[in-house]
Image (spheres, helix red, strand yellow):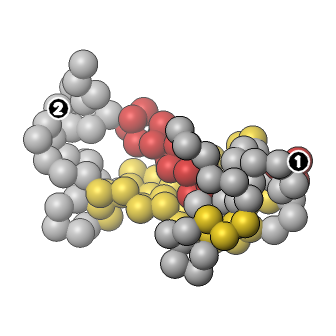
Amino acid sequence: MMLVNRNQTVHGGLIMSMTDSIGSLTVATRGQWMTGVSTDIATTFARPAGKIGDTLHVKGSLVSMGKTLAFTRIDFSDSNGKIVAYGHHTKYIASTLNHEKNVKFSADGETVIEGKEEDD
């Protein structure tokens, strides 16, 4: 299945879906086993995101994480480093902060220092 539009560039729906997924994974990097529920999500398309065979880079950043909400930003860039799209994803996390499967990572993010590391 090719996820391109009629212009043979990356379909905007794919980028929206990736905004959702990468936003959640960004929250998970803080040790959240459950990443909450979406309260707001949006993506802005700056230019065509590439054709079949092109490389698309995606970077998720945690803007802020409090006791109720987590705010993420997701940037999509082409192989030349130019931004092709960017988005944000806000998650309601209050009910997930004390989940028994949450973990705490070392400063470098490589080692679980509190909680149990999952095998799967």
Residue drawn at (54%, 62%), measured in percent from left and top?
Answer: 73
Q: Image check: 23 left or right of 54?
A: right
Farthest-out residue, bottom: 107
Q: Is residue 20 above or below residue 77?
A: above
Asked whether the viewer can see residue 92, the reply is no
First in sequence: mark 1 vs mark 2 = 2
Instruction: State the image coordinates of residue 117 (x, y, percent, origin top left).
Output: 62, 53
Residue drawn at (46%, 53%), measured in percent from left and top?
Answer: 44
Q: Which of the 4 image quadrants contains residue 102? A: bottom right
Instruction: State the image coordinates of residue 57 (x, y, percent, origin top left).
Output: 29, 57
Q: Which of the 4 image quadrants contains residue 69? A: bottom right
Label 2: which secondary element: loop
Label 1: which secondary element: helix
Q: Is residue 57 above or below residue 16?
A: below
How crowded is the residue under tag 2: few (<14 C-alpha within 10 Å), some, or many (20+)?
few
Residue drawn at (22%, 24%), measured in percent from left and top?
Answer: 2
Residue type at tag 1: Ser
Number of the label disc, if any, that sits on residue 95: 1
Asked whether the viewer can see residue 116, the reply is yes
Residue type at tag 2: Gln
Nearer to me, 31 or 80: 31
Which residue has dot 2 on it?
8
Residue drawn at (87%, 64%), measured in percent from left and top?
Answer: 67
Disc 1/disc 2 C-alpha distance (Å): 42 Å
